Image: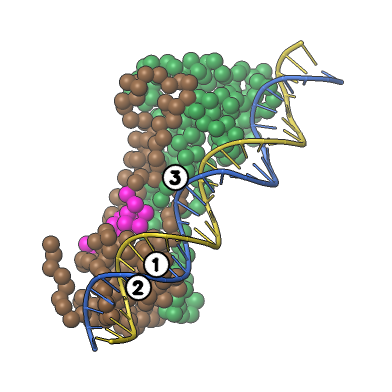
Chain colours: A green, B brown, C blue, D yellow
Amino acid sequence: MKLGEGVEAAIHCAATLASVDGNSTMPGAALAECFGLSPSYLLKHLNQLTAARIFESVPGPAGGYRLARAAEQITLLDIVLAIEGREPAFRCGEIRQRGPVKIDPSAYVKPCGINVAMLKAERAYRAALAEVKLSDIVAEYAAEGDPRSYAASCAFVERHQRPQKSASPKQI
Amino acid sequence: MKLGEGVEAAIHCAATLASVDGNSTMPGAALAECFGLSPSYLLKHLNQLTAARIFESVPGPAGGYRLARAAEQITLLDIVLAIEGREPAFRCGEIRQRGPVKIDPSAYVKPCGINVAMLKAERAYRAALAEVKLSDIVAEYAAEGDPRSYAASCAFVERHQRPQKSASPKQI
DNA sequence: CCTATTGCGGATAACAATTATCCACGATAT
DNA sequence: ATATCGTGGATAATTGTTATCCGCAATAGG
């Protein structure tokens, strides 16, 4: 059981975007630089987050990314699912009906008890992630993190964020 | 986030071994046949379970595998950790201190808040798995599963289990 | 209108992990 | 003695992850 590295990058980027002003944006290249990540690969993940409606993207010069909604409305689960996909970690291959023990298919209408237990555990995992809001992460960082580090992050954002002419797009 | 296929195989094998008589054993080849799995690869997983003291192995003809302790004393977490390893799914790469924002190392003595939240969620996952005993899986299968399927499984075990001469090894 | 900047998507390659197979070896019941 | 079985190592086949590149569309600013 392993999460891709993209998850860590995605959450850090989301936390960073949470502190840009109003509807300003931050280019993907700046986010990559901020964490020492390869820009070309990070863009893939930023794309997934945009597709999941967690980020919004603005093309053109002065373009970039911003949060699609308030940090209070984004959970760690949203981000993890956007990067890792929605399929459960445990994939039941129904091996119970693959050997010589296999009998009539009508005997397997009930889901495999093992699968049920594993999925239930994963629901607990996801529930725990859903309880953590992006705003919690940012608040904890501002309150508990080292003040110098926090100031450095804010300065970096200040330096790279770009104000937008048009107002934030209307909600559909 | 994905679990290896070995987990499904391991749990099914454990549940099967739970219904062998006394200190009888069942050969790995029989377990592989039971679920239509490749024998040579399944042996690797059975080995991991033996190393984790969940299974016991007996060499020689009439040898094979059996549970190392009662099914009530084995949880799904035990099995998952034996196969997947004990490292957490989320591996914090400390990317917060990899970009130009990085400052003095003394600013990063506190663990990253993101890592804390992710590890907490995984503890919830493991706690849920620890609550499910192998005996629960077997009992549920006997009570709720299709009677024909249950009978077929029992017959398969009957046919392949092998009684042992010597008593179960003493607990250390 | 032109240009520079930015996100998007596809194609592709480098790399790592998982899955699978095979063989020589030691143990042991018959 | 011999056939059966688990162990461990070596090795391949397969898949997934990580990373890079290039052409395209969008757009702010001159």
Q: Is residue A37 left or right of residue B113?
A: right
- Whole-percent x, y for residue D20 in the image: 61, 36
N-term mark: 2 or 1: 2
**Is the magenta region chiefly helix, strand or loop?**
helix
Disc 1 versus disc 3: distance between alpha carbons? 24 Å
Q: Nearer the viewer, residue C13 or B64?
A: C13
Query: Which quadrant would the C terminus of chain B be assigned to in this image?
Result: bottom left
List the residue tagged with mark 2. B28
Same chain for labels 2 and 1? Say yes or no: yes
Is C18 located above or below residue A50 in the figure?
A: below
Is A41 located above or below residue C16 in the figure?
A: above
Q: Chain of mark 1?
A: B
- Whole-percent x, y for residue B94 in the image: 40, 31
Q: Chain of mark 3?
A: A
Tell me the residue at 24%/61% (across/down). B53
How many neighbours does mark 3 have within 10 angstroms: few (below 14), some (14-19), or many (20 or more)? some
Disc 3 versus disc 2: distance between alpha carbons? 31 Å
Same chain for labels 1 and 3? Say yes or no: no
Is A10 located above or below residue A2 in the figure?
A: above
Q: Residue type at mark 3? A: Leu
SS at badge 1: helix
- Whole-percent x, y for residue D22 in the image: 72, 36
Disc 2 versus disc 1: distance between alpha carbons? 8 Å
Residue A3, labelled with which disc?
3
Residue B42, labelled with which disc?
1
**Magenta segment, which residues?**
B72-86
Tell me the residue at 53%/25% (across/down). A33
Q: Is residue B97 left or right of residue B63?
A: right
Same chain for labels 3 and 2? Say yes or no: no
